[in-house]
Amino acid sequence: MAVIGVLAFQGDFARHAEAVSRVGAEALLVRRPEELDAIDGLIIPGGESTTIGMLMDRFGLMEAVHARLAEGMALFGTCAGAILMARDIENSTQPRLGVLPMTVRRNAYGRQIESFEASIRVDGVASEPFDVTAVFIRAPLITAAAPEVTVLAAFESSPVVVQHGRLLAATFHPELTENFAIHRHFVAMAVT
């Protein structure tokens, strides 16, 4: 059985853990570097990306995640997690993993009060394309992605789900829906 870690500093890590369990994998909450040794993939949930980055730095998780990625661990970032994965963050020098060749703009859709839901079509994750209600909460915008990054879903012509090898990122919160296809896809990525 696949073991998927969920970084448990901020955000709705409990809902991610529930989604992982619902698709048949074991979920492990991660707060320390040594816990990465027991997992096949790691989810970095939403929250405040600067704070999560600083906490990852403080607890030695930046280096540890980089080491595990070099060994083949899969990584999935949602909202703030996607920001932390981005190689470039517009107008920011915040701590980041910087592993996904894309550029993001933080809070591109507005403040918390301007959060919204939208139906998006996701392709390349399941056997057939499907629609999912995407929950955008102070969501980032992917403003550029390298040609080798595959766009799996877009909203208003901007990528919202992207994949590059064993790296997966979503600018919205898939854990807040009852459709767990994206989590299922990530678990499959982690054990392939």
Image (cartoon, rainbow, N blue to C red):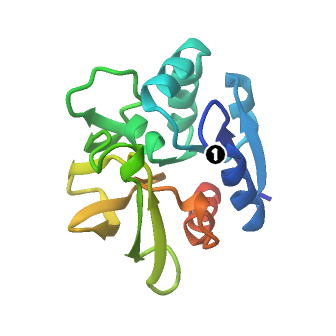
Q: Residues within 10 Å of mark 1 (few under 14, many from 20)?
A: some
Residue 145 in sight here? no
Task: Find residue 39 and report its image quarter.
Answer: top right
- Quadrant in which residue 73 is drawn: top right
Residue 112, position in %: x, y?
A: 42, 44
Left or right placement of residue 23 versus residue 158 in this view:
right
In the picture, measured across the screen, residue 175 lies left or right of residue 141, that is right
- Counting every numbered tag in the picture gives 1
Along the line of sight, the residue nearer the viewer: 94 or 86? 94
In this view, 177 is above or below 165: below
Give the residue type at disc 1. Answer: Asp
On the question of residue 39 being in view, the answer is yes
Q: Position of residue 93 (x, y in %)?
A: 28, 20
Question: Image point 40% across, 21% down: which residue?
Answer: 95
- Residue that protrudes farthest toward the front in the picture: 113
- In the picture, which quadrant includes the N terminus? bottom right
Is 28 above or below relative to 158? above
Residue 132 x/y as whole percent: 48, 75
Q: Which secondary structure lies at badge 1?
A: loop
| Picture quarter with the C terminus | bottom right
* 72 or 9, nearer to the observer: 9
Residue at (56, 44) in percent of width and height:
45
* Mark 1 lies on residue: 12
Residue at 52% x, 37% y is: 47
* Residue 120 shown left or right of residue 101 in the figure: right
Residue beneath the point at 52% across and 84% down? 127
Residue placed furthest toward the bottom? 128
Residue 157 placement (x, y as % from top left): 20, 67
Viewer-proximal residue, 172 or 34? Answer: 172
